Amino acid sequence: MEVLKVTGNRKLIGRVKVDGAKNSVVAILPACLLVDGEIHLTNVPNIKDVEYILEIFDYLDISYTRRENEIIVYSKYINNTELLIDVISKFRASYYFMGVLIGRYNNVTSLYPGGCNFGERPIDLHLNGFEKLGCNIDINNNIIKIKTNDLNGSVITLEKPSVGATINLMLAATKAKGGTLIDNVVMDPEIEDVVRFLSELGFKIHTRKNSIYVFGFEPEPDLKVVYEIIPDRIEASSYMILGALNGSLTIENVVVEHLDELIKLLRNIGAKVVVKGNSVYVQRSKIKSTDVVVKEYPGIPTDIQQMLVTLLSFSDGVSFIRDNIYKERHKQCNELNKMGAEIVYSSGLISILGVNELEATNIVGSDLRGTMALVIAALNTRGTTIISNYETVNRGYSNLLSKLNNIGATVNIEEYKLQEAV
Ligand code: EPU
């Protein structure tokens, strides 16, 4: 069995360059299939979710070339809209193929999307929206069949803001007859990124603070587009939290505005944070306890909640974190408690009593951000922590090992004998 071996308690010093945003690229790559042409994407992160999408491209017979942080997609008309392949169930963003295929071909059959397992993650808002655009939906045995004769523009008011539903409905609506108004939207940077990309492809989309208007439209044939994905604010935030706990780190290639709330929070709890151009310097300090409520953008994102639990485990008092977006996103807490943390949680609320130090031991990774929260804890713990079931961290962290080892960490993947593991 392969495990992640983390030798901790060394001060981490240096520069980390942030890669392109996972939650943008997982929508932008499928969106290429809305048009015919050559789409050259830059700042593409080296993550497992991108590999999953390329596997789906292979299956659909879409060619591409990939080098370092770039992918060129040669998009063309496809005959196959049936996605009954295992990879669909391996990640959540496979749902964007539904929006794209229903948009362009009026027809898609797909397995149910997978993704990190931290409680219920329904897709009812996506499906209700497709129905509003004129689709018939049949769900049987984990297989979703969506069909329409004609997509017609509509007014869709989301019951609650959803990144995935907003993007998926936008993707489908690009080809509907007439305009579609999507309301009660929160304009996350990744949604804005997808809007900018679709506009570059020639689609007509207008945004306001909480709504998006998509005008169904056929762009030019044989497009040639070059597009740069925005930096990943969650990757940036993860390294900022690591810096506040254990380092002296300059995090480069960030959009500072996307990190405003975290910068405020880190400064409030005592960390030194200096912003310069498109980089942020974060220096370790004594951490003060605090209370945090995660919110939709521009609030503190749910995606960094688990790493904040690690950070506040080393604070000088009691902290509370409320996450009502994903109330069950706390699988890593038991593992942190195994290391000596004092965390108690119930649905949506986590209380953390700060301790002086954690102890290295054998722990088990869970979801993507939860596993990163364990890696950050292990890096601030004397001794060697063994993390089994760590692989999901590769779904969202580009070149994680080399980035960590470049700033002085010792993190390796090693073969581990089963009887020694947890
Ligand atoms: N929701 C519904 N019905 C739906 C969709 C969502 O009730 O049809 C609820 C969810 O259960 C949640 C809330 O609405 O309570 C917001 O969920 P959202 O739809 O925004 O989540 P998502 O689009 O599935 C994206 C990111 C997640 C991130 C959330 C929240 C992608 C591929 N994933 O998920 O990213 O946590 O938005 O910001 O964009 C991650 O990067 O680790 C990650 C999980």
Image (cartoon, rainbow, N blue to C red):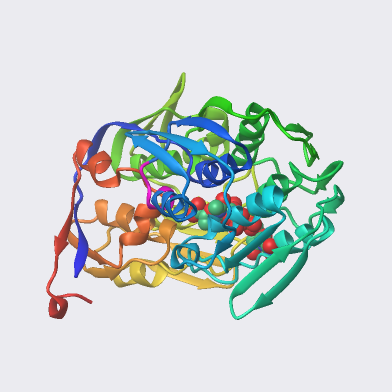
What residue is rendered at 60% in x and 35% in y?
Answer: 193
Residue 247 visible here? yes
419 and 141: which is toward the camera: 141
Q: Quadrant of residue 349?
A: bottom right
Q: Quadrant of residue 261?
A: top right
Quadrant occupied by the N terminus: bottom left
312 and 85: which is toward the camera: 85
User: Which residue reaches farthest top?
Assistant: 277
Locate residue 127, reporting x and y percent. 73, 63
Q: Quadrant of residue 368?
A: bottom left
Q: Is residue 39 above or below residue 375?
A: above
Locate residue 396, reporting x and y percent. 41, 50
Locate residue 63, reporting x and y percent. 43, 42
Left or right, 64 with reference to 131: left
Q: How many marks?
A: 0
Quadrant occupied by the C terminus: bottom left
Left or right, 384 with reference to 295: left
Locate residue 382, reporting x and y percent. 18, 56
Q: Is residue 196 above or below residue 389?
A: above
Is residue 134 on the magenta stretch?
A: no
379 and 396: which is toward the camera: 396
What residue is rendered at 85% in x and 50% in y?
Answer: 152
What residue is rendered at 76% in x and 58% in y?
Answer: 130
What residue is rendered at 65% in x and 35% in y?
Answer: 192
User: Which residue reaches farthest front?
Assistant: 79
Residue 166 visible here? no
Q: Which residues are magenta?
A: 46-50
